[in-house]
Amino acid sequence: MINPNHLNEHSPDTGNSTQPGTYFICGLLATTILMVDLHIPLGVASGVPYIVVILFSLKSPEKRFTLIAAVLCTVFVGIGYIGSPPAPDHVPFYQVLANRSLAIFAIWTTAILTLIQRDKTHALHEERLKSLLTAREIEIEKEKLKTLKATMRTVQDITGNFLNSMQLIQLEIDRNKTLSPETVNKLDELIQDTAVRINKLGNLEEIREKRMAGDLTGIDYEQPTRKI
């Protein structure tokens, strides 16, 4: 049987809050990249590695965490621009600005695209889950209908045997205009036996099928009683 809870465990969003470990690792990565950036002269695209922080932030189920990480990395790119050693003389100023702009562009492009992709993946997962649940519901309904049909065939079999025996008794009444004591005893046994069979069918704790006449499926109500 499909367990929806089990499926949800493999959902892209497995919780409602960000784990402390995600905070720690993202902070550590961002700080490490900033420290490296502060020791590299301007003109080198040292802000691009912040993409790693954005990608790791996707472990959080909260969209805002990824957006906050993108904002933080953007601020760190600015701090790196202010605090890094000056660019060599041969590196023009526009190249410094271009590298920093490229880093910020890469950070936000990665954040937006990955969030969109995660939303699509989550939506596909939800659709798959709904499809599986719908298929399971259909399967359950088919099993219920199958069991109902088998139960009705079994009831028909029990009542059919009873009616056949009653017809024999009716023939005896028509022939003799009365019932012998032996026939009365048989009638009483027949009624009791039919009642016992129906009670067994109604008190089953486990459904087991059996083959009936005409290769039809019925319910096996003659199951041994469980000992307590």
Image (cartoon, rainbow, N blue to C red):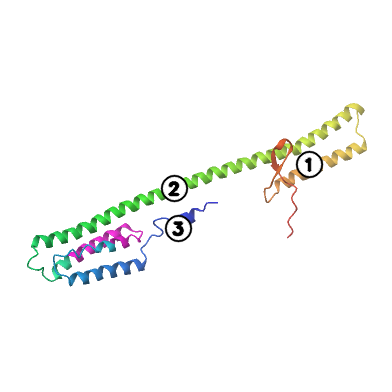
Q: Earlier in the sequence, mark 1 or mark 3?
A: 3
Which residue corresponds to the image point at 8% horizontal and 62% vertical from the top-left? 93
Query: Helix or strand or loop: what does disc 2 sit on?
Result: helix
Q: Can you identify the residue that label 2 sits on? A: 128
168 left or right, relative to 225: right
Which residue corresponds to the image point at 11% horizontal and 61% vertical from the top-left? 95
Disc 2 marks which amino acid? Answer: Arg
Residue 119 to residue 79: above or below: above
The CA span between labels 1 and 3 is 51 Å
Disc 1 marks which amino acid? Answer: Thr
Query: In this rendering, which labeled residue sits more in front, label 1 or label 2?
Result: 2
Which residue corresponds to the image point at 25% horizontal and 63% vertical from the top-left? 50
Which residue corresponds to the image point at 73% horizontal and 39% vertical from the top-left? 212
Query: Helix or strand or loop: what does disc 3 sit on?
Result: helix
Callout 1 environment at 10 Å: few (<14), some (14 to 19), or many (20+)?
some
Magenta-drawn segment: 54-77
Query: Where residue 154 appears, x then y in whole percent?
Result: 71, 40
Q: Can you identify the residue that label 1 sits on? A: 194
Query: Helix or strand or loop: what does disc 1 sit on?
Result: helix
Residue contact at pointers 1 and 3, CB within 8 angstroms = no
Q: 176 or 43: nearer the eye?
A: 43
